[in-house]
Each structure stands twice: as structure tokens, then as C-alpha cells.
Amino acid sequence: MSAITNHMPTAELQALDAAHHMHPFTTNDELADKGARVITRAKGVYLTDSEGNQILDGMAGLWCVNIGYGRKEMAEVAARQMMELPYYNTFFMTTHVPAIALAQEITKLAPEGLNHVFFAGSGSEANDTNIRMVRTYWAEKGQPGKSHIISRKNAYHGSSVGSGSLGGMSYMHAQGGMPIPGIHHINQPDWWAEGGDMTPEAFGLARAQELEAKILELGEDKVAAFIAEPVQGAGGVIVPPESYWPEIQRICDAYDILLIADEVICGFGRTGNWFGSQTMGIRPHIMTIAKGLSSGYQPIGGSIVCDEVAEVIGATEFNHGYTYSGHPVAAAVALENLRILQEEDIIERVRTVGAPALKAGLEKLAEHPLVGGLSIKGMMASLPLTPHKESRAKFAADAGTVGYMCRERCFANNLVMRHVGDRMIISPPLIIEPEDIDVFMTRARTALDETYAQLKEQDMLKPAC
Ligand SMILES: Cc1ncc(COP(=O)(O)O)c(C=O)c1O
């Protein structure tokens, strides 16, 4: 029996962590030298670390703790469900109440026509389900050749072999034999970094039309689906120009391509509506969900599936599923999360209070000499850092160097702001109050000032040639 507790000295915990724990998306040797930050507890929007620091979590964990930390009701529901039925599967003609109730509740909240849920344990698993589901759908309709899936460069859809292949992160494809065959990536609608002299609207249209070009190149009878996040999250909170999504919808409709909206970040209130698809005005056939579904209190994800696809898939045995599909404790906890989101009007408050306050604060922060703009939708935002605002120039230093420096200054000021390359990312719990948004802005400004001073001192405020 392990005697490791929160009360042990930080250095001891770090040494044990380094000895036995391999971290995701980390150079573990480097971490072992530095020592991991040990988080011991959390309440509301604040984390406590093993040194007693109170850190404002501007990332809601990994974009997931929508209702904030420390909700007693969630723990009580989990305990009750563990006593009643801690586990049973949903294979072999069985079901249980938490899975039934959660599937019903999700479909009540989902856009019209999306009335079916296939559960998974995470967003990655759910996207793997989607690959198999859309290919099976077309095969069952007598078009097995309609199996190619189009995605976007710099998209993030998960880290399993299937979902990582859907994603468009080249550094991920460089390891482990990805992408799998039949996945194609078009350019992303990132006007700030790639728009050059084009207007955002012309650029958005051009990037959407790359989908049409790719369909024509592969053949309409070969393309099963297009997958995209309504607003790219892990790629840097990239809000597409307004011209983008209507054109994508037109193309999917015109060529009979299934549209998969990856709502893993955007879903459950992040953009100010239940789903990002509603915010961006799109009509997907399948939506990937995870993260905010349980506010991260339990690992659970899934695919919300439209009637037409569910009907076709339902006519055959779909040879797919996970031991933890619809896990009763995870489902009960997710259901409680949905109750809290609804009864406390959290998403309405995002629209009327949280998002406007965040936007007002970030607009002021965007005036900082190091910040080149603001990308924001609801309560997800990014601040691209630049040595030259007017030209939206990149730094001469390797991409991500300045972002990393700024992230470290944020931590030093008890603030979590993640960096993606040289963009600073903001995605706080949805329940953040205006006074905590003020605390966020004060700490973020200090971090930016310190980064700016450090860059000046090291002569790094130079644009790339
Ligand atoms: C849009 C999107 N899809 C899928 C995933 C993968 O989810 P998970 O980490 O739960 O597998 C993520 C994770 O960040 C995501 O942002």
C-alpha cells in the first residue's frame, strides 16, 4: 500500500514522479531534471500546488472543468453510483440507467436530428469511433469506396493512432506511423498567421474552397466525411473568418459528404451555446464530445449521431466499442454535470456576463506591445505574440520559444495560461466571476511585461526574415 500523500515534501514527490511516471506530450528526461509542478487540490477556479501557491486556472484543466473545481454534488453522485452499480458493460444486449439517462439528456440538448449517442472513454476514442462509423455507413449504403476522410492541418482530434491521423499536427505524424491511409489534410482558416494581405473574408472563402478542390481531386464517390472543430482549440484558438463555415456547409451538402463537428472543446458551453456548431451555424451529422460533458470529473466521451447515420449503422452489427463505453459512474457524474450547467444557467451566464467580461479584459491586454491581436469566441481565446504588431510578424527565435517564456512568467505569477507556439491560450472554467477575470488580467499583464523585458534584455524582439 502506497504511503504517498499531499503532505510529503515537493522534492520527494517530484523524485518519485520522475522515477515512475511517464507524462504525456513531455520530454520526460527534461521534466525529471526540472521537477514536475505538483497540484494538490482545487476549488472554483483556483488550483493549489504543493508549495501552497494559489494558481488561477485560465485553462480549466485541459479545456474541460466547465463547472469549476470542488463541486460536492459530483462526488456524492459518484459515490452513490459506485455503491449501486460501479460497473457493467453495454455490450451483449445489456444496458443500465446512467447510460440510458445520459444518452437521453445529451440528445435533448443537441441540435435537432442528432438523437443517438455512442459512448467512449475520451475524445480520442470517440473520433476513432467516428472513422469506423462513417466508413461503415457508406459501406452499408453500397459505397465502400467512399472511405476517405478530409481534415485540416493543425487540427487536433486526439492522440490515438486513428484520431491522431485525423489531426493535422505534423510533429505528431512524425512518430508512430501516422497518418493511417485514407486521411487527407487541407489548410486551416488561420487568417492571423497565414492570411497575408488578403481580407479575412476572402481568405476564409479560399480556405473553405480547398475542401471542394480536395473532393474533386479524390473523387466525390471516394470521400466519406469532413471533420473539423467549429473553433480550433489546441491549434491555437483559431476563430475562422465568417465566410468560412457557410461555404464548408455548402460544399458538404453539394457533394454528399458527412460533416463531423469535433465538439470536444467547443461543446457544453465553451462558445456561449451548448455546442460550437450552433455558434458557428453548421449542421453536422456527427458531433464528437468529451471534456465538458463531465467537466473532467470523470473520463467520458462519445459521438452524437444523426438519425440517418444511426439508422444505417443500426441495421448491421457495428463491431466496435469500449469496455468503458457508457461507464455507469462516468455517466452518472456527467448527468449531474449537465444538471448543474442547466439549473445554474451557466451557459446563459457565459453569454451575458463571463464572455463579455473576458473579451473586454483581453481587448485591453491586446494593446500590450507584445500582443499582435485577439482571437476569441465565448470563453476560448488566444493572444498571438509578435515582435511587430502591424505586420503580424513571427519571432526570429524558433516558434514556441517566446510562448514558452511567457507561459513560465505566467506560472511565476500564479496563473495558468498555456502556449501553443507563440500564442497564449485562455479557456477558464465557465463559472469564472468578473472579479477573478480581473485577477487574471492583472497577472497576465505582469507576465507579459516580464516576458517583454526579458526579450529586450536578450535582444530577442526581432522578427523572422
Ligand atoms: C477537439 C479535440 N478533439 C479530441 C480531443 C481528444 O480528447 P482526449 O484527450 O479526451 O482523447 C481533444 C483534446 O484536447 C480536442 O481538443
Image: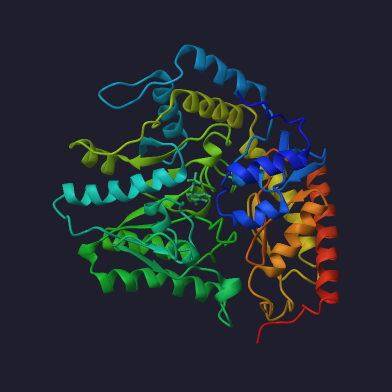
Given the current orientation, which residue lies at the most extreme left position?
Answer: 142
Residue 167 image position (x, y, % from top left): 44, 59
Q: Tell me: residue 414, above or below residue 246.
A: above
Q: Is residue 9 above or below residue 98?
A: below
Q: Position of residue 438 (x, y in %)?
A: 83, 48
422 on left or right of 225 = right
The residue at the point 74 percent across, 39 percent down is 12
Q: Quadrant of the N terminus?
A: top right
The type of colouring in the image is: rainbow
Locate residue 101, reporting x and y percent: 43, 23
Quarter-wise, where is residue 90 in the image? Answer: top left
> Looking at the image, which residue is at 71% across and 74% down?
386
* Residue nearer the viewer, 257 or 458: 458
How many tags in the picture?
0
Where is residue 346? Give x, y as percent. Answer: 64, 35
Which is more toward the observer, 5 or 335? 5
> Can see residue 425?
yes
